[in-house]
Image (spheres, grey):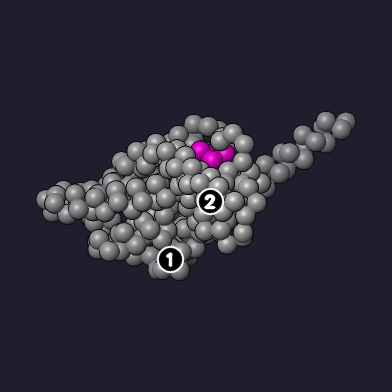
């Protein structure tokens, strides 16, 4: 029986690894760009790799680079990263319903590797997902993100100094590239982004809050307001339906 279980686990791990190859390929340009921008931001290669391996969240890492450039404190950066990645709680809870019974520590171990991409692959897989499958899927994606970040840093270090300094503009271009597709999906995202920008501008110009806290509070405040509006609209529709 142990041999059969081990064989099954190995097979599932291999299937997960194969499914993770496409994710690894997709991570190449994004992780490469992160490594390049990390170099221009002033991080060492050790700090760059550590961020990719510990934080392991593309959008949060880009935001962290931006906040570091602005001289934001560590607490504000950690809090902002937490807010950006809070959706991972929902993804993990959803995937837990699809995963095979296993020890809690085992599930916690592969839950660390859940990203938007690995969650999507696991969620659409037919049937349940095993620990072996998730470890194979996550490991390929995780290693590719770290390796490509390091390669991006090395490439960035080889660029002329003037070009390295100008690459900071690419950081804001990346944010625009991340935001625009989401804004196309609905007015809610447009309103949320606009409201957060207005709050952040007010907080910054009036010097009410530091740069880091201005971003954090603006994000939270705009999210709460948008959700309250959605809740009120939902209640009104319900009342009209009852009538």
Label 2 vs label 1, nearer the camera: 2
Q: Which residues are magenta?
A: 119-123
Mark 2 nearby-residue class (10 Å; few <14, some 14–19, many ≥20): few
Alpha carbons under labels 2 and 1: distance apart: 59 Å
Q: Nearer the viewer, residue 100 or 49?
A: 100
In the displayed structure, would residue 231 be above or below residue 71? Answer: above
226 or 180, which lies in front? 180
Question: Looking at the image, which is closer to me, 175 or 149?
Answer: 149
Closer to the camera, 163 or 12?
12
Residue drawn 43% across and 63% down?
Answer: 77
Q: Marks 2 and 1: CB-CB under 8 Å?
A: no
- Residue 184 in view of the camera: yes
Residue 243 at what x, y percent from top left? Answer: 88, 31
Q: Residue at x 17, y 54 (%)?
A: 157
Residue drawn 41% across the image and 61% down it: 54
Q: Which residue is mark 2?
A: 3
Most common secondary structure along the magenta stretch: helix
Rendered image: mark on residue 7: none
Image position, residue 242 (x, y; %): 87, 33
Q: Secondary structure at mark 1?
A: loop
Could you tell me if residue 194 is visible in this image? no
Q: Is residue 191 left or right of residue 54?
A: right
In terms of sequence position, does the residue under pointer 2 or pointer 1 come before the other? 2
Give the residue pinned by disc 1. 210
Where residue 115 appears, as percent x and y from the top left, is 48, 47
Q: Is residue 185 magenta?
A: no
Q: Residues within 10 Å of mark 1 (few under 14, many from 20)?
A: some
Is residue 108 toward the left or the right of residue 52 in the image? right
x, y percentage for residue 211?
Answer: 41, 62
């Amino acid at each position: 029986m142990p041999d059969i279980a081990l064989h099954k686990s190995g097979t599932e791990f291999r299937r997960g690894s194969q499914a993770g190859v496409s994710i690894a390929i997709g991570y190449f340009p994004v992780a490469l760009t992160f490594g390049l921008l990390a170099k221009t931001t002033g991080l060492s290669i050790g700090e760059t790799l550590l961020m990719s391996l510990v934080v392991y969240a593309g959008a949060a890492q880009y935001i962290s680079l931006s906040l570091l450039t602005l001289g934001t404190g560590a607490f504000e950066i950690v809090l902002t990263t937490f807010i950006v990645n809070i959706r991972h709680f929902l993804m993990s809870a959803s995937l837990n319903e699809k995963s095979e019974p296993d020890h809690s520590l085992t599930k916690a171990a592969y839950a660390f590797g859940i990203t938007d991409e690995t969650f999507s692959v696991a969620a659409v897989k037919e049937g349940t997902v095993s620990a072996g499958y998730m470890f194979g899927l996550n490991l390929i994606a995780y290693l590719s993100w770290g390796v490509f970040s390091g390669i991006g840093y090395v490439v960035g270090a080889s660029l002329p100094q003037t070009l390295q300094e100008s690459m900071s503009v690419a950081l804001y271009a990346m944010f625009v590239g991340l935001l625009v597709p989401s804004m196309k999906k609905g007015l809610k995202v447009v309103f949320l982004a606009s409201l957060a920008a207005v709050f952040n501008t007010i907080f910054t110009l009036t010097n009410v809050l530091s740069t880091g806290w201005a971003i954090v509070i603006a994000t939270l405040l705009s999210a709460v307001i948008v959700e309250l509006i959605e809740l009120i609209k939902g209640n009104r529709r319900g009342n009209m339906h009852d009538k």
